Amino acid sequence: MKGMLFVMFLAVAAMVASPAAGAEFFEDFEAYDVGSGIMGQAEWTVWDANPLVDTIVTDEEAYSGEKSLLLTGSCDIVRIFRTVTYGMWTVKAQVFVSSEQAGTTYFLLLNTYNHGGPYNWSVQLSMDPVRGTIVSDMSGSQSLPLVKDDWAEIIVELDLDNNKHSIFYNGQEFVTNAPWTTDGKKALECIDLYSADNPGNRTFMDDVEVSTQLCIPAEVERTGESTAGTTTRIEGDEVPAYGEGDTLAVTLAISNIRGDKPGCPDLGDVTITEQLPEGWTATEISNDGAFAGGTIVWQIPAAQLAPGQLTYKASGPITRATLGISGTVAEKGNDLVTPIGGLPIPTVLGGLSADGMLLSWLLLGPYMTTGSATTKNAALMRLDYLTDDADITEATVMPAEGDEVDTQYDVAASLGLAFASGPDINPSGIPQWFAWRDSDVQVNFDDTMLFGAVDNVMAYGVCYVCAKEDIAATLTAGSDDSIQILVNEESVWTNPVERAWPGLVDIVPVSFTKGINRVMVKVFETGGGWNFGVSLTDENGDPITDDSIVVTLDPDGCGGPPPPLFTFKRGDANDDGKRDIADAIKVLGYLFGGGATQLGCLDAGDANDDGKIDIADAIKILGHLFASSGPLPEPFDACGEDPTDTDTLDCRTYTPCGTGV
């Protein structure tokens, strides 16, 4: 498989040029000037944002209209859209290969693409006029005669629901129901048109099309950010984050309303639904949306469905590094329910995801090794590659972000420090621990924001697990190539193997003692891909859903700054995340119920903030609800502490803000 293929993202997010009937995306290149670079036009970009791999629009050949895209040299063009993850799809392109072409050009489809990786290919068609063949490299090397000096159509029929695809060329089927992926995502993220570094290549692409049999009523994309401006860095990029006590402002952008699409009925009434994390509440919901039971629902008549935005604000307790917001779009009379795209989760600042992935690491390296001799030798893997021959050893180091290690290479097992492509890594030429927060199951060292493509190296990763009590747990790991895991000073796993990424297959029972526990991984690389991933679950392999475990990068803390104590929302006496008449009834029950009714958060029941619970608080709540008396005293909109906390009232438990949970 080629290493740096040109990638062009195609999906259902945008329409350009003049789409063919029923097409979700269509490009005929007629909108661009002849001789102009395609990069930067209509959201086209280039592989890894490298402007040296651009190509041009030409009128030398064209299937329709007067223009097409020229593939020559080492062009590597990318167009990014949102991921397609379900349904039946058809990808088409017209291709013209000159008989004078000296090299090979490619048509590819990827199920995974990001600038700097990871990448995962599903279709690779290589077109070689010297051999006179078009070959399907990914599905058994089937081949057909290559049409030269004329146009031929490539068609890929894709069934994402059943993980299958078929390929047609010039009217002939030569791949039938092959797996779409065996180790990637069941998704379509891009079409890839690539010229393999040959200035004599002359391939032209035209009428590129992606269509679907799905009758999608509209596209809905989610974005969100903290109203406090909280951010974090994920895989080198600064992104909005959700911190304790924040409020998340969410926007749902509606676009691509279905019109008269062949095979689809007239547009029906649409229901858009957002499911919030457990214990979260929503406020300031636009367009008459209704919130109940953790779900926001908008009912939109077909005649009123139009491009625009829906907005709301959400807040709630934090227990893990990712909190799922999921949404759907449904249409009356249509069995298809489509997911809302865009931002799937509000990112928070912890290091352990809801499904148990360790996302945050302190990284150190890359250190040079002897390559395969080290990677496949457990005894060599267990040596100390970082020691400074003084105070710092692998067994005892408790690093913090920014700590430098003056590794003594005449004592340490490493041979030296290799070059890292990522910005600000080892800036003084001395190994330095740096924080890396990942977004998925795999930390990809080959990412250009990390170490880039280096071979015969190793690197360290460290995080700290804070346990409330002694606890038995399970670490499940995967790596490319070999991996060693240490908990505190004990080596608990060594797998001396050269392998591609296998998924999370190494199962390691571990024990954490009460307090801070250091988890260290050492990942060794010979050549090719270089990555690792580790999950942390209970001893039965189930996610840890309570706060018995917290993950941090701070060697002196347990998960960073603790959440504010005694946070609540004024007037929510019954602890259900909203204010209604039930709260006034709760206060009255507490006052006159003979002890049968208790308040977990007396501060929440103190609606008028006078430092005591009495009938005036019930009246204050009712006035807010029915007499337009205005908001209650703070904290009102968002979780917070009592700003006038000079009384004897307390707040032992308040679930919507995580107090006492």
Image: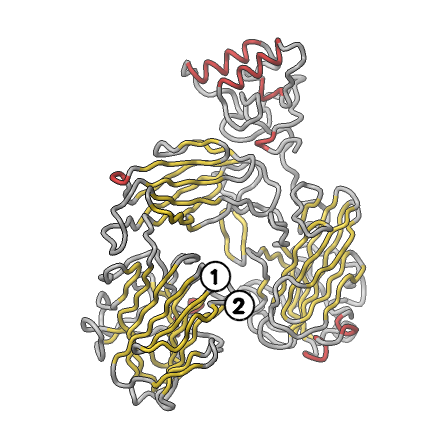
Tell me where residue 83 appears, x and y as whole percent. Answer: 42, 58
Is 40 located above or below residue 308 in the figure? Answer: below
Q: Nearer the viewer, residue 117 or 87?
A: 87
Tell me where residue 535 appears, x and y as whole percent. Answer: 65, 55
Q: Residue at x 65, y 43 (%)?
A: 545
Q: Nearer the viewer, residue 532 or 408?
A: 532
* Disc 1, SS: loop
Q: Nearer the viewer, residue 560 or 521?
A: 521
Question: Quick one: quadrant of the C terminus?
Answer: top right
Tell me where residue 131 appears, x and y as whole percent. Answer: 38, 90
Q: Position of 141 compared to 214: left or right?
A: right
The amino acid type of the residue labelled 2 equals Thr
Q: Position of 591 compared to 407: left or right?
A: left
Q: Position of 614 compared to 203: left or right?
A: right
Q: Residue at x 59, y 24 (%)?
A: 642
Q: CA distance from mark 1 to mark 2?
A: 9 Å
Q: Which mark is residue 199?
A: none
Mark 1 neighbour class, 10 Å CA radius: few under 14, some 14 to 19, many 20 or more: many
Residue beneath disc 1: 186
Tell me where residue 603 appears, x and y as whole percent. Answer: 61, 21
Colour treatment of the image: secondary structure
Corner quadrant of residue 132: bottom left
Q: Which mark is residue 182?
A: 2
The amino acid type of the residue labelled 1 equals Lys
Corner quadrant of residue 49: bottom left
Is 463 located above or below residue 10 in the figure? Answer: above
Corner quadrant of residue 387: bottom right
* Disc 2, SS: loop
